[in-house]
Each structure stands twice: as C-alpha cells, then as structure tokens.
Image (cartoon, rainbow, N blue to C red):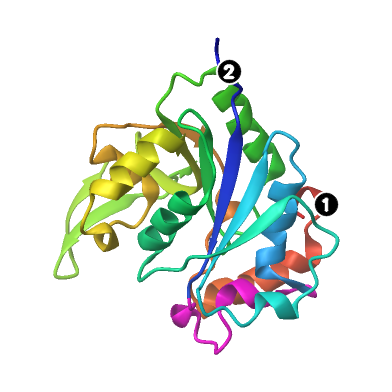
Amino acid sequence: MVSELNIYTIIVAAGKGERVGFNTPKQYLELNNKKLLYYSLNKFTKVDSIKKTFVALSKNDQFFDKEDYSDLSNFEILLCGGKERSHTIHNALKMINAEKNDWILIHDAARPFLNIKVLENLILCIKNQPENNGYVVAEKVNSTIKKTKNMRIEKTISRDDIWLAQTPQAFKFKDMIKIYGKIDNLDKYTDDSSIMENHNIYPKIINSDFMNFKITTSEDYQIAKLIAKIIDAEFL
C-alpha cells in the first residue's frame, strides 16, 4: 500500500542579517507594515497541500513573540538555529515528525516575493512526479556571464544552461535526514541542492523569476520596500 504523500515546509529565519547592516535581523525588517517573515509564512500556511509549515528560528530569538501572527495558522516554531544555515536546517529536520517518503520544502524567509503560481507548480510536480529526487526553484540567466581572474575577464561562459538557484528547494525527508547527518562540513554549502548534488541527487528545475530575489544587502532591502508598496495580492 502506497503511503500518503505529505509535504512540509521549513522556513529558514535564524540568521542575523549582518550584511543588510541593521541591528534587527532581516527577517523582522518591515515591508509595507508587515515583517519580512510574514510574507513567506502567510503564503505557505495558506496552501492546502502543505501539511504544516515550520519556522526555524535562532535559539535566542527575541523578536517573533513581539509580533502578531494571529491571523495565520498551521505553523510551528522551532528554536533550532545553528552556526550556519545548513546547521539550522539539519537541526530542524531532526525535530519534525516526518515520514521517510514525505517531502520537505526549504525556503528562505529573506525571499518574500515568491509567486504563488511558482509554489503551486512546484507542489504539482511533486505530486505528479514523486519519483524525481528533488526540485529547485530557479531563475534563468539572461545576462552575459564572464569568468574572471584578478578582476580581468578570461572568457565568456555560455548562459544556455545557467540558472540562478532560489528557494524553495524540495527533497524527500529520507534523503535529507540521511545526507545532512553524514556531512561534517555543512558550513561550506550555500544551498540545499549543492549538498544533495554532492551525494548524487540531482534535482529538476522549476522556472521562477527575478521577483523571488533574496534580500541580502541594504540595497536589496530598499528595492524590496519599493516593491512591497505596489505588488498585488498574488505576492502576499
């Protein structure tokens, strides 16, 4: 008998946001009178196909309880922040009660403008093709790519098969918990896909767009504030 296919989300919100240059962690910065974290939490908790959303916070988080998320439901807080992003995710995986064939979506709280249509397409692919090892939301590169050495261009790289990885990234729980548990140097990886690729799991791409950019610098935050004032409901 085939077990029910459950999908869970882990929103990673344990970072300090030091590169943004504010005293407040970036997941708690305001965008049009809402916290950055609210945008992602609101989106994932309203998708019926997602069984539960977990929010991975710093073990010393002092901000979440000060905010009002009473209009949202079906989420759980995990105080599991680690040294780096990958450690936080590993800690979260060990805390959730998932079955081996369940799927886990990992999403950065610093990506508030994920289009709901992209998320729905990702979930549809998981349901229709669960035999795939994983999925990564990504944006096709349109700019010309240069390889450099000491700030001098060495060559131009074909952009035909080049994508900018985003989140959410989706993998089976059994693969993630096994692979994350055997890696000692998790801090050298910048996303979940690179960890899985290193263990011969190669996910498929889900087409996304620029709006799903990650707020990393103060310039990103200024752009996000402008976008938040004009976006329509599909990005909330």
Left or right: residue 216 compared with residue 147: right
Measuring from the top left, give residue 105's x and y in whole percent: 53, 43
Q: Is residue 21 above or below residue 9?
A: below
Q: Is residue 116 above or below residue 69?
A: above
Measuring from the top left, give residue 25's x and y in whole percent: 55, 79
The local crowd at label 1, few if under 14, some if 14 to 19, many if 20 or more residues have their Cα within 10 Å, is: few
Q: In which quadrant of the rendered image does the C terminus lie?
A: bottom right
Please give the name of the residue rendered at 74% of the width and 40% of the height, measured from the top-left corner: 47
* Magenta-colored stretch includes residue 28: yes
Who is closer to the viewer here, 99 or 173?
Answer: 99
Using the image, tell me which numbered label, if any, was put on residue 233.
1
Label 2 element class: helix
Please give the name of the residue rendered at 24% of the width and 37% of the height, measured from the top-left corner: 199
Residue with the mark numbered 2: 128
Residue type at tag 1: Ala
Which of the 4 image quadrants contains residue 64? bottom right
Q: Earlier in the sequence, mark 2 or mark 1?
A: 2
**Looking at this rendering, what residue extends furthest in the top direction?**
1
Looking at the rendering, the stretch of residues picked out in magenta corresponds to: 16-33
Label 1 element class: helix
